[in-house]
Image (spheres, rainbow, N blue to C red):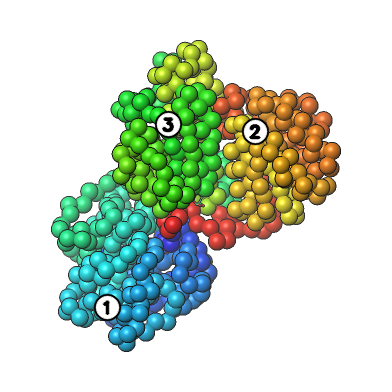
Amino acid sequence: MCGIVGYIGPREAYPIIIEGLKRLEYRGYDSAGIALFDGKDLKVCKTKGKVVDLENKLLNEISNSGSIGIGHTRWATHGVPNDVNSHPHHSNSGNLVIIHNGIIENYDSLKKELSSRGYTFKSDTDTEVLVNLIEDVKSKENVKLGKAVQIALNQVIGAYAIAVFDKTQPNEIIIARLGSPLAIGVGKDEFFIASDASPFIEYTKNAIYLEDEEMAIIRLNKDIKVRKIKDDSLVDPYVQELQINLEQIEKGGFKHFMLKEIYEQPKAINDTYRGRLLREDAIIKMSGVEDNMKKFLAADRIIIVACGTSWHAGLVAEYIFEDLARIPVEVEYASEFRYRNPIITEKDVIIAISQSGETADTLAAIKLAKSKGAFVFGVCNVVGSSIARETDAGAYTHAGPEIGVASTKAFTTQITVLTLIALRLARAKGTISSSDFRHHLLELEMIPKKVEKALESDAHIKKIADIYKDSRNCLYLGRGYNFPVALEGALKLKEISYIHAEGYPAAEMKHGPIALIDENMPIVVIATKKGHYEKVVSNIQEIKARKGKIIGIVTEGDVDVRELADHVIEVPETLEALSPLLTTIPLQLLSYHIAVSLGKNVDQPRNLAKSVTVE
Ligand code: G6P
């Protein structure tokens, strides 16, 4: 987590860095800081809080900011979020400054070693240890900054993306990565540094994505030098042309990114299947699947690894793959999978799902599976991300940038990709008839229009949100395909409104959660026509008997649940396997409106970050 921005070139660095940090705030927003070199002096300013607090602190102080600088927005790991623990961190001499995203695991032993030689530390961070280690190496070995960074990093265990500046060599910034992303924007006589390309897309479309264990020496008016940290060998960097544009990362008239992204779902889902779902020819074309069809068909089972909302998409996929393609599926939290000595064989296919493509645990799970010979397929949103590169093959979701920390369009587009894969495999295996296959394609093509229809309930959902906004707890129930949707609905509410919420399989309610039900408890029940409808209606009866407040998510025209529930929200009818793409929409809107009416920061909920690059 944490966002990193840097600039070196002829422009004024301050506005580029501040605006860039605002775009990276999704990565963390506990504190922010900046270091600027104006040609003579190094000015460092940092503060607890958001980038806007940093901006306010600097108001009237920045006249000539100079044209070189680095900035940071933090998601705290070591040390509470306060001014002192904020980045950038100085070395003891005051010459070096560093910003860091990641964790230096052996910082404690390094700190003891440095302390024994007279170094002192102001903060509780691992980052301040690293900058002093670099300074120590630099003076002991009498080397330039780049070399000192390299030697120091070879003593470090952990994960990092760093940018280091030395005011005694003020024409260069050194950056390095291991496990946390770093991109370099290459302009004419200028370079931009950032955790992702969003801070520099209006300045250049050319980007270099640093690979793990690489560092770059970025000098004013010189070519970039990229080197391997381990053996110092030179790397010829690949300059990639960026596909994103400014409009995609702006709010476009919506009050929050989350709302914009909820409303983008019809288009995002369409973009996901466009060119892949060829209904008239009755085929699904996905090169990553096609090229590896033998591996998919020979698979004993599919293991899905993911975290958070992506894990919920994996759970939906379990139903789809088993139902349509008759392949056994296991869905694992990446963080558990990687540490529990799992049994993985060469006949396993692993599907790793990740919006950001940077989640540390998912990445580690992939590496583990690869080391055991399994074939690993990635479902990512961010093009060129670490997971997209680490996997053997994959399919992008093409949802476009997702900036709201609470994931919305990433979820529905992940389900769309996974549905396409399941249908393709079902066809290849002969587990779906040709007419059923065509029917699924037709229905899938109709989903964007049906999502639009589901979005029409927005004002109605807002009214329901106003009624329940002061609840302390909330239950979400669903069965079959819609059980994972219940989990996702509860997660959305927790994430952005801080109301405690639990998702449960509807029938499991009797084994515990039913004890919580009283007249103050809202219970969201997904009760669409095709998914075990009668059974869910019985569950609703059980809730009603205990005076719980029922919010039913029902199929258009439903009568039975309407009679029992306190409120119903309708979604259009579709096939059961596709229903999560519709039932999710009201749950996203419900959590959004509750959080807004409680005055919460919807796009930047407390303690969370969009991209979790630490384990
Ligand atoms: C964080 C985000 C979630 C996301 C999860 C997994 O917790 O706040 O929205 O679902 O990470 O992220 P990924 O990028 O791997 O999908």
Who's the residue at 23% across and 64% down the image?
218
Tell us which disc is closer to us: 3 or 2. 3
Number of numbered discs: 3
Mark 3: few/some/many CA within 10 Å (<14, 14-19, 20+): some
Provide the secondary structure element on which disc 1 rests.
helix
Residue 528 seen anywhere in this rendered image of the structure: yes
Q: Amino acid at mark 3?
A: Arg
Helix, strand or loop at label 3? It is strand
Identify residue for label 2: 479
Examine the image and state in which quarter residue 417 appears. Answer: top left
Which of the pair 11/368 is nearer the observer? 368
- Quarter holding residue 562: top right
Q: Nearer the viewer, residue 297 or 397?
A: 297
In the displayed structure, 524 sits above or below 14; it is above
| Residue at (34% x, 83% y) in the render | 115
| 574 shown above or below 52 | above
Which x, y percent locates residue 502? Answer: 66, 47
Q: Nearer the viewer, residue 378 or 385?
A: 378
Mark earlier in primary sequence (2, 1): 1
Distance, label 2 to label 1, CA atoms, is 58 Å
In the rendered image, which quarter contains the N terminus? bottom left
Q: CA distance from mark 3 to mark 1?
A: 51 Å
Task: Identify the image quadrant of residue 530.
Answer: top right
Considering the numbered disc 2 on the image, is that residue within a helix, a strand or a loop?
loop
Which residue bears the numbered disc 3?
301
Give the amino acid at mark 2. Answer: Arg
Which disc, if any, is residue 135? 1
Q: Residue at x 29, y 72 (%)?
A: 165
Say what amino acid the circle numbered 1 marks: Glu
The answer to whether residue 463 shows anywhere in this view is no
